[in-house]
Amino acid sequence: MGLPEPGPTPTDDALVTRWIAGDETAFDKLVTRHGPALHGFLKMTLGDSAAAEDAWSETWVRVVRARSRYVAQGQFRAWLFSIGRRCAKDQSRSIRRRLRLGAALEEHGARRVVTSPALRLVRSREARALDASLQGLKEEHRSVLLLTYRYDMSSEEVGQVLGLTGQQVRSRITYARRLLRESLARRGVGDDR
């Protein structure tokens, strides 16, 4: 009588199948399940809450448009994050264009049209150093670290998101960790091991 039936939690692939068949609640479950992690990834990738929100929304729009092309192989999360990564790249290019336009307008005496991002909450010195160090990495290194450590993806999942083999991901993680350690050391934060 309207109560959910007890049983195992449906897989992402089962939810996608139900959604394609017309069950909109299945889509809501996918958004609830993966939306927060995707938003966090986009925020860390772009470094700006508003830009992350735009990329997050665009990611789900693209998922809706591409749902019939999804191949159910247990890789929905990696598929979703790869779409999100492309949206973040598009958003980043758009931000750079707006900033260039703002600078050009400023040079010609026009009022600046680009507003500064909202103030971030004050965080500990170590957290600020980590954030700055992550933002200082190239996108390819930042993404591999975030997907692996923050979003707990396997090398194979990260590889699917980034278009790499599992071995390439592991190699890139090793290199990215070294770059991050060096950047943190320059900021006075490091291993006490």
Image: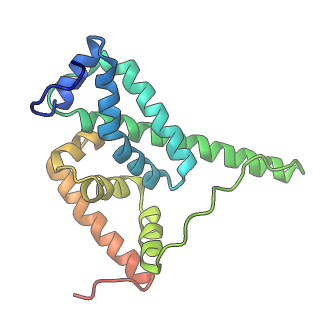
Name the spot of residue 160 as percent of width and height, x first. 23, 39
Q: Is residue 175 left or right of residue 104?
A: left
Q: Residue furthest bottom?
A: 192
Give the residue drawn at x 32%, y 25%. Answer: 27
Residue lying furthest left in this view?
Answer: 7
Residue 92 visible at all? no
Judge by depth and name the residue closer to the eye, 112 or 5.
Answer: 5
* Quarter of the figure that contains the N terminus: top left
Q: Residue furthest right?
A: 109
Quadrant hosting residue 25: top left
Q: How many marks?
A: 0
Q: How is the image coloured?
A: rainbow
Which quadrant of the figure contains the C terminus? bottom left
Residue at the front extreme, as displayed: 1
Relative image position of residue 30 (x, y in whole percent) = 30, 32
Q: Which residue is painted at 61% across and 47% down in the image?
A: 96
Expressed as whole percent of the image width and height from the top left, the position of residue 105 reads: 82, 47
Q: Is residue 107 above or below residue 160?
A: below
**In the image, residue 5 above or below residue 174:** above
Q: Residue at x 29, y 16 (%)?
A: 23
* Relative to 172, 98 lies left or right: right
Q: Is residue 62 above or below residue 88?
A: above
Residue located 42% across and 37% down the image: 86
